[in-house]
Structure formats: structure tokens, C-alpha cells
Amino acid sequence: MLAMKLVSPPAAPPMGVTMAKKCGSLSALADKTGGGGRTGTGFPSFLPKEVEKIKDPFSRTLAQRIERLPVQIGSSESCIMSSVVKPLIQSETNPVVLLHCFDSSCLEWRCTYPLLEEAGLEAWAIDVLGWGFCDLETLPPCNVASKRYHLYQLWRSYIKKPMILVGPSLGAAIAIDFAVNYPEAVEKLVLINASVYAEGTGDLAKLPRIVAYALVSLLKSIPLRLYANILAFNGMSLATSLDWTNVGRLHCLLPWWKDATINFISSGGYNVIAQIKQVKQKALLICGEDDQIIRYKQVVRLHCELQDAIMRKLPDCGHLPHVEKPRSVAKLIADFSRADCC
């Protein structure tokens, strides 16, 4: 059932939050700096120059639509310039807000996002604080509390209506954590191959700093990202896999990426196991039949533990259905967003 209580005054920001820009008027700053400069090929100038080498047309098109909006997360004079893809249309139904996986970006939605717009939905693709293409030059905290509060402030400043919050993989844990803490902001949840039973980052949070930096450096390496693509997708050609690897690691080329990722890992990460049964919103669970990362029995467990959930399985599909089967995922999200039952 949709929570209908009025939005309360904003909670205090997490301890230690620092900001990148002076905010002033959010709307004025958004109008002035949202798009930023553009390259000759139409890409925002804040994206790494390697975006020009990407061949996938869907990635290129969505990348050209990324902009930065000022999101206030501390004092009234400071904000973080936060990367999003804004909707072109205003819909009568509540907006669909798309999160992404661990250490990823809004470009993950390159195939499904245009189909959601074709379906007439008001769709936002946003970068979670610490990943994607936000301006983190001042190295703000990127722990769970900071990610949650940043998303709340973005919602409160720009989206302003209860949303259908969509989270793939670790994004499902982000969505659950947010829905439990800010129920007035979430009408429904869509959880895709949900990674919600990990107990945070575990022993990785205790690594010596020099070891943590070495480990995180591996995360952006082409061999590791290529291997992750092989695990995530079915029957992909090497050329496509290499191109999608470059899409998936583009945000890693920003100068603050390594520090932001280490900050998240050392903070302990997401552990939402105890929150799952507290979710009040109706949820749609989407799982790929051939997912090699999240086991099917975990999806079944989640279906049983949520108070109000339905489950849909997609055949011949791996860990990222919104990339592999965009038409199927877009239809499931569109139908779910418009109906009381599916």
C-alpha cells in the first residue's frame, strides 16, 4: 500500500559529510550548470574522454543525456553536483527511478531506458553517491548512510512524488534500505536479481589501506571487468563484451573513484537482511533464469520474506536482464507501475 504521510522535514545529514559546491538556489544552479559544457560530439565535458571510444549506440545516446544537478546534503550553502538522466516527459503515474549495480553507473540502463520512455513513463536514471559520474572532488563520505541521504535529498529536491524504485543486484539492497528509512518516498519496488543477503563487505572492511588500494585498482582492470561480463551475460561476442567492458568501467576513470570506493568498502557496506521483512511496499522481483551470480533459491527466499511480492523469471537471461532483455524488463516495469496487481 502506498504510504501517504506528508514528507517530514529533512533529517540531519550523516556525520562528516562534506560538499563540493556552493548551492545557493538549487533550481538556479541546475539551470546554470546542469548540462555543463559539451564536447563536439555532444557528450558532457565532465565524462572521461574515453567515452568517445565507445561504439555501442545505446550507450552513446544515453551518455549524451547525462547531466549534473546540485543536491544539498549538508549546510544550506553546499551541495554535490550529482549525475542523472532526467525524464523528457511528465507522467500521470508516479515516476520510475532507476538505480544501478555495485560500482556501476546510470549507463547500465542504456537499453531499457528508451523503452520506458516509449511506454510513456516518467523515468529517472540516477548515479548512486560514490559511483557513476557525480562530482566527488572533495571526497565526501560514501557509506550507506551518506548514499541513502543523498538519494533522499535528490528525490526531495527534484522528483517530489512517491516513486517506483528499481534496483538491480546490489541496487536492490540500496532500494530496500531506502524504502524502509523513507517509506513516504517509495510507492513500489522492482528488484532485479537482487543481491540482498550479503552481510556487508565483511573482512574487506578491515584490510590495511595499502592492500585496499591495490584490491580496488583491480576492480577497474579490463581483464576483471571482462570476466564479470562473461559471468553476467549469455552468448556475447568478444567484440561486444570488450565494448561493454569499456562502458562498465568508464566511471572508474574519474580521479576520485578509487577513494570513494575504498570509503564504501571500509565502512562495511550494505547489510539489509534484517530490513527485508520491514518493507511495506509492494514489490516485483525479476530474475534471470541463467543468472550465475545470484542463486535462484535466494530470489525465492526474498519472495517469501517480503510482505507483498510477485516474482517473474526471464528465460535465456543472465544477471543483468535490463541489458540482455530490455523489452521484457521494460514491459514488466511499465505494467507493474500502472497496476495494483500484475
Image (tube, rainbow, N blue to C red):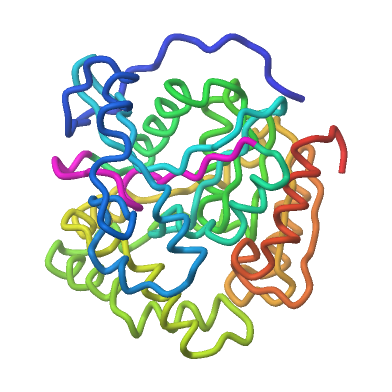
Location of residue 6 by image quarter: top right
Q: Residue placed at 77% from the left, 37% from the top?
A: 307
Q: Residue placed at 47% from the left, 27% from the top?
A: 155
Residue 259 image point, x, y percent: 19, 55
Q: Residue placed at 24% from the left, 61% from the top?
A: 48
- Magenta range is 122-140
Q: Nearer the viewer, residue 17 or 334?
A: 334
Q: Residue furthest right?
A: 341
Residue 55 image point, x, y percent: 42, 75
- In the displayed structure, does residue 216 sit left or right of residue 329? left
- In the displayed structure, does residue 283 sit left or right of residue 123? right
Magenta span: helix, strand or loop, mainly?
loop
Q: Residue furthest front?
A: 40
Q: Residue placed at 52% from the left, 34% from the top?
A: 178
In this view, 336 is above or below 107 = above
Residue 213 image point, x, y percent: 17, 66
Residue 40 image point, x, y percent: 26, 58
Q: Is 124 included in the stretch rendered in magenta?
A: yes
* Image quarter (top left, top right, bottom left or bottom right) of the C terminus: top right
